[in-house]
Image: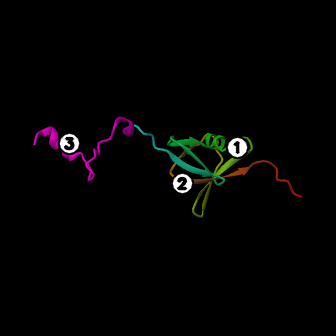
Amino acid sequence: MSEQEEHAQQTRGSQGTSTETTPDQAHKPHVISFTVDGDEFSTEEKSLTVRQILALADLDSTRYYLVEINGQQQKPLTDLDGQVHLHEGMKFVSVSTGPTNVS
């Protein structure tokens, strides 16, 4: 068996197809999904500011801030320009900073 044939044999999966990654696969961006108020959003960015997350959720950053929900823990994110390092499945809820109407 030639060296080239041996290499081809080593890079084939159990179905006889090549397992090598193509340039398109090697540069495929990683998409991170997260929720704000139960609505799902996704980004290819590893981190976003609180302001950017609010904008994705179509929320006015002058009237809202975010709280990160992680199990029973709640972490207020009030610094609009603070970076949030995103992980798959993160959960946020928005909190209004405006007056609450009481009827």
Q: Is residue 34 above or below residue 55?
A: below
Near mark 2 (Cα within 10 A), the count class, few <14, some 14-19 or many ≥20, is some
Residue under circle 1? 59
Label disc, if present, on residue 89 of the rendered structure:
2
Looking at marks 1 and 3 on the same chain, the residue that comes earlier in the sequence is marked by 3
| Residue 20 part of the magenta-drawn span | yes
Type of the residue with mark 3: Ala
Q: Judge the density around disc 1: few (<14), some (14-19), many (≥20) Cα neighbours within 10 Å.
A: some
Q: Residue furthest left?
A: 1
What is the spatial separation of the Cα atoms under label 2 and label 3, in whole angstroms? 39 Å
80 to 15, vertically: above or below: above
**Mark 3 — residue?**
8
Residue range highlighted in magenta: 1-26
Give the left or right position of residue 53, taking residue 8 as reference. right
First in sequence, mark 2 or 1: give its number: 1
| Tag of residue 32 | none
Residue 82 lies, in percent from the top left, at: 59, 42
Whether the magenta-drawn stretch holds residue 8 is answered as yes
Instruction: Report helix, strand or loop for mark 3.
Output: helix
> Where does the image place residue 8, in percent across and percent down from the top left?
20, 42
Q: Secondary structure at mark 2?
A: loop
Query: Can you say which quadrant of the picture contains the N terminus?
Result: top left
Disc nearest the viewer among 1 and 3 = 3
